[in-house]
Amino acid sequence: MSPEAELTRIEEQAAIWFTRSRQPAWPAAERDALAAWLAEDPRHAVALREAEALWGALDGQRAALGAGLPKGRRSLWRPALGLAGAAAAAGGVFWLSDPARRADYRSGTGERRVVELAADGSRAELDAASALSADFSGAARRLTLHAGQALLTLPPARPFEVLAGDGRLIGTGGSLGLHRRAERVSVALLEGRATLQQGGRRVVLERGEAASYGVAGLQGPVAADPGTATAWRQDQLIFRRAPLAEVVQDLERYRGGVILITDRKTAEISVSGAFSTRNPDAVLAAIGQTLPVTVRQIAGYLVVISAG
């Protein structure tokens, strides 16, 4: 194998290990296997740290990936961002600081989980690759959605406060769907009454109303669609004029790995439809066939979507 091919193989292995390590529920056996792989060759740690550095620069703005990268496959691992050299010089042990790893409750890729939070009937249903923390020690029930999607049932035993991103929902009891993405959080109040706050703005949500907030501010309230908000419980994802970037974020939670969109225009393509969560690769294939994009898989775990 040529030195170039060997380096490509190492980078692809690093991509696989990195994407595995980002899952909320990562088995101890895989952590041990990663440690063994790192010990095999000093280049392994360098490649893994390059992957971490690249992702750190792209996280939260993956839709703009193509703006700063040269063309070609190797640009994914050798971007003109000044990161590769810094990562190689850093050395040491690879690590990730992901708040979801410190969550009280997590679900794995493609896994749904039901959590009984307290004897008062408080419970959470977690969608795939979701992470939730709960603190019931104070006067109010305090819950934090770190990642993914959840359906929360909170009987009116005492007040609750639900945090996600830079917003919070306050009420005394109810049922609500919460969906956290990179740039937007969606809330659908299915039962009860609650106040949603972000920054200096607040809105009151009544039963059957929804709102969202994020970089564009607080939007709503509007009429909620319970079928859409809880479709994941029936193995479906429903999108109505959603940007492709949001569709991709949801697919990652069922497929695992990383899906990158190389330019903002592609990321903003509008998508509508109902998709099964049981076969994410079939959804990716449908995206490639019906939208003006090219879908390319690298080493199985990495998928790149670019303008067609």
Image: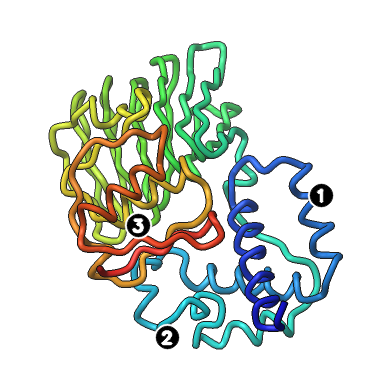
Which one is in front in this view, the residue at disc 3 or the one at disc 1?
Answer: 1
**Given contact means CB atoms under 8 Å apart, are the residues at marks 2 and 3 in contact?**
no
Q: If you read the primary sequence from the N terminus, does the residue marked by circle 2 or circle 1 appear first?
A: 1
The quarter of the rendered structure image containing the N terminus is bottom right
Q: Say which amino acid is labelled 2.
A: Pro
Badge number at residue 183: 3
Q: Residue furthest front?
A: 1
Q: Say which amino acid is labelled 3.
A: Glu
Badge number at residue 70: 2
- Real-space Cα separation, disc 3 to disc 1, in angstroms: 33 Å
Q: Secondary structure at mark 3?
A: loop
Q: If you read the primary sequence from the N terminus, does the residue marked by circle 2 or circle 3 appear first?
A: 2
Q: If you read the primary sequence from the N terminus, does the residue marked by circle 3 or circle 1 appear first?
A: 1
Rendered location of residue 168, percent (x, y): 38, 42
The quarter of the displayed image where residue 14 is located: bottom right
Q: Secondary structure at mark 1?
A: helix
The quarter of the displayed image where residue 3 is located: bottom right
Q: Say which amino acid is labelled 1.
A: Asp
